[in-house]
Image: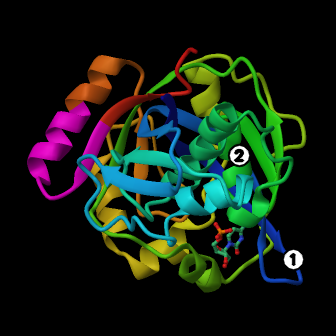
Amino acid sequence: MIEERAPAKINLTLHVTGQRPDGYHLLDSLVVFAALGDMVRVEEAETLSLAVTGLMAAGVPDGEDNLVLQAARFLDPVRGARIVLEKHLPSAAGIGGGSSDAAATLRALSALWGVPLPRNCLSLGADVPMCLAPGAQRVSGIGEGALPLSGLPSLPAVLVNPGLSVPTPDVFAALKEKNHPPMPARLPALGDFGALTRFLDTTRNDLTAPASAQAPEIGTVLEALEDARIARMSGSGATCFGLYPDAAAARAAATRIGEAHPDWWVADTTLNPAP
Ligand code: C5P
């Protein structure tokens, strides 16, 4: 049996800098991964099968709709394996759950079957390539251009989802201005919490306005994270993250928000954890 973690993907920044003729949007995004995530386990079997377990399994498809099975077929169209996906992350939530699951499946099955990882897996989803080697990176293009970033600190954080899924295509479609400025070509030193958060103050998630127009609860989530040093939406939402100077502050905020909003998904975690 081989197991691979499928960590939550967080867009610390997400600048939409243009649109390709095929409709896909060009991004400039600082991406990190959380200690928190789903888990993918694979073992040898005659035929390909998927079981979905875990606290967040409800509503997750276990058929061909699931990116995990599509990733397996992408790697080898005929080989079998028994795959168990343990869901801890909310789906369609802006934190790359499905993409990270697909990337973890590619890593696990490439080890199980002894085949190399695919060079290009963009066709599985724009976020899958960035999840293949989950570490801090600056992502450009529609998600395919990833430049690994070293030296970023670990970040105590709270993730909050108000219990809604916002379809990514709808959010991009509702974005009025498509040409926002990118981040500076050369990033400043981002080696500690102060430097990183000061830099984040100068950046944005350009999808916040169109996502909030469809799901006004996002505004309520950002208000609940008001005591965070940085409070921002990830991806196309609706999950937002708050960054805190230490783990105790993050835990206290998660407890407070969870008690005030028992129907929300609230988790304290570490972003960009030490390996
Ligand atoms: O590639 P993926 O299936 O994750 O993307 C879902 C949808 O989100 C796309 O069909 C497209 O409408 C939109 N999208 C976009 N620009 C991106 C990523 C996604 O317009 N960079």
- The foreground one among 150 and 128 is 128
State the image coordinates of residue 92 (x, y, percent, origin top left): 45, 65
Please give the count of numbered marks on the rendered protein.
2
| Relative to 159, residue 90 above or below | below
- Amino acid at the residue labelled 1: Arg
Q: Is residue 236 left or right of residue 41?
A: right
- Residue at horizontal 23%, vertical 48%? 55
Asked whether 171 falls inside the magenta stretch, the response is no
Indicate whether residue 255 is drawn in magenta.
yes
Q: What span is in magenta?
A: 253-267
Q: Residue placed at 53% from the left, 39% from the top?
A: 44
Query: Does the closest atom of ligand 1 sit within 8 Å of the Cβ of label 2?
Result: no
Image position of 50 with respect to 180: above or below: above
Few, some or many C-alpha atoms within 10 Å of disc 1 (few <14, some 14-19, many ≥20)?
A: few
Q: Nearer the viewer, residue 110 or 36?
A: 110
Q: State the mark number for residue 20.
A: 1
Pick the quarter of the image with the C terminus: top right
Mark 1 vs mark 2, foreground winner is 2
Residue displayed at 59% across by 79% down? 169
Q: Amino acid at mark 2?
A: Met
Q: CA distance from mark 1 to mark 2?
A: 19 Å
| Label 1: which secondary element | loop
According to the image, label 2 marks what residue?
130
The percent position of residue 215, horizontal first and vertical second, equals 37, 76
Visible residue check, residue 182:
no
Tell me the number on the disc at residue 135.
Answer: none
